[in-house]
Amino acid sequence: MTASLAEMTWREVADAVAEGATTVILPLGATEQHGPHLPLGTDTFRAWALAERLSAGLSDALVAPPLPIGCSDEHQGFAGLLSLAHETLADVICDCARCMAGWGVRRLVLLSGHGGNGDALELAVARLAEELPEFRVVVLGSSTTVPAAILTLAASDGIPADAVGLHAGEGETSEMLAVRPDLVRMEQAEPGFRGGGDSLIARLREHGLRPITPTGVLGDGRLADAGRGARYLAAEIDRYRLTLRDASASHMRRPS
Ligand SMILES: [Zn+2]
């Protein structure tokens, strides 16, 4: 049977929870520019795909519909942007968590496809820890850097880290070729800003992407490959499984 809340009836959900499905994975996306070649919903499609793949390997998890709007103020100046204040997104997450706790969910996995959602996630986690101390919350995918496992896979295929890129580069483009190839305009892909090092995140936070990359790309999507994208997604799932296992282990050890 499907694990997708949006496709289930309330009785199916109640039965699944009674049989132990007390984890919900909530995919968090964004609606923001992803260069000339990727759709605005790139982070939402990626988060949703990751959530579905993660749940397939878990016996106790349901998947909530993705939240398609996140915190993307760093993309001001590009058409199509929809962005929430950190507090607003944290409010939405907390409202959903309260509902879930009401029908028996005990663990919420917040799986973000967009690094800019990190502050909102921190806020939501802190509020829920205070308000619902028995309700566990695990955050996945909120990093603002490219995961080391992806950089290792890229390097083994001869793709340099600055081409993988933080945004709409080879990394996200390859993943989108694996997830929604019908939405990737490869013929429109252009090289973006490459480089920046540790100071890049600080500059992005202060000035946004527009002054750094007029096309909106950090990296180079022209090097993307669907097979590599599938391997990136698999590597992320492996990392998420370890994080969930470690989170469960530390919860078991916690004094009651
Ligand atoms: Zn993205």
Image (cartoon, rainbow, N blue to C red):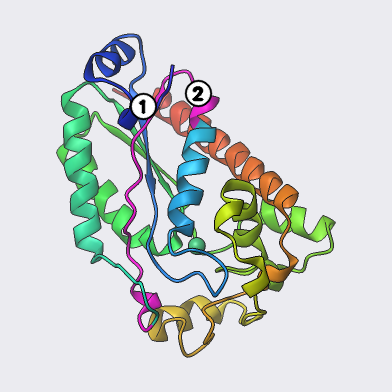
Task: State the residue at coordinates (48%, 29%).
Answer: 55
The first of marks 1 and 2 along the sequence is 1
Magenta-colored stretch includes residue 141: no
Mark 2 surroundings within 10 Å by alpha-carbon count, few (fewer than 14), some (14 through 19), many (20 or more): few
**Picture coordinates of residue 23 (x, y %)?**
36, 26
User: In this rendering, is residue 252 above or below 121?
Assistant: above
Residue placed furthest toward the bottom: 211
User: Is 7 displayed left or right of 99 in the figure?
Assistant: right
Residue occupying the point 74% across, 67% down? 223
Tell me residue 226's x, y (percent). Answer: 70, 51
Quadrant housing residue 160: bottom right
Secondary structure state at the residue bearing disc 2 = loop
Residue at the disc numbered 1: 23
CB atoms of marks 1 and 2 within 8 Å: yes
Numbered tag placed on residue 118 in the rendering: none
Q: In the rendered structure, which amino acid carries the disc numbered 1?
A: Thr
Under circle 1, the secondary element is strand
* Relative horizontal placement of residue 161, taking residue 51 as reference (left or right): right
The number of discs equals: 2
C-alpha gap between disc 1 and disc 2: 9 Å
Percent of width and height locating residue 164: 67, 66
Horizontal arrangement in the rendering, residue 38 relative to residue 107 (left or right)? right
Tell me the residue at 78%/65% (across/down).
159
Magenta stretch prevailing secondary structure: loop
Residue range highlighted in magenta: 55-77
Q: Quadrant of residue 147?
A: bottom right
Image quarter (top left, top right, bottom left or bottom right) of the C terminus: top left
Q: Which amino acid lies under the numbered mark 2 shown in the image of this protein?
A: Leu
Measuring from the top left, give residue 54's x and y in whole percent.
52, 33
The answer to whether residue 173 is above or below residue 16 is: below
What residue is shown with label 2? Answer: 58
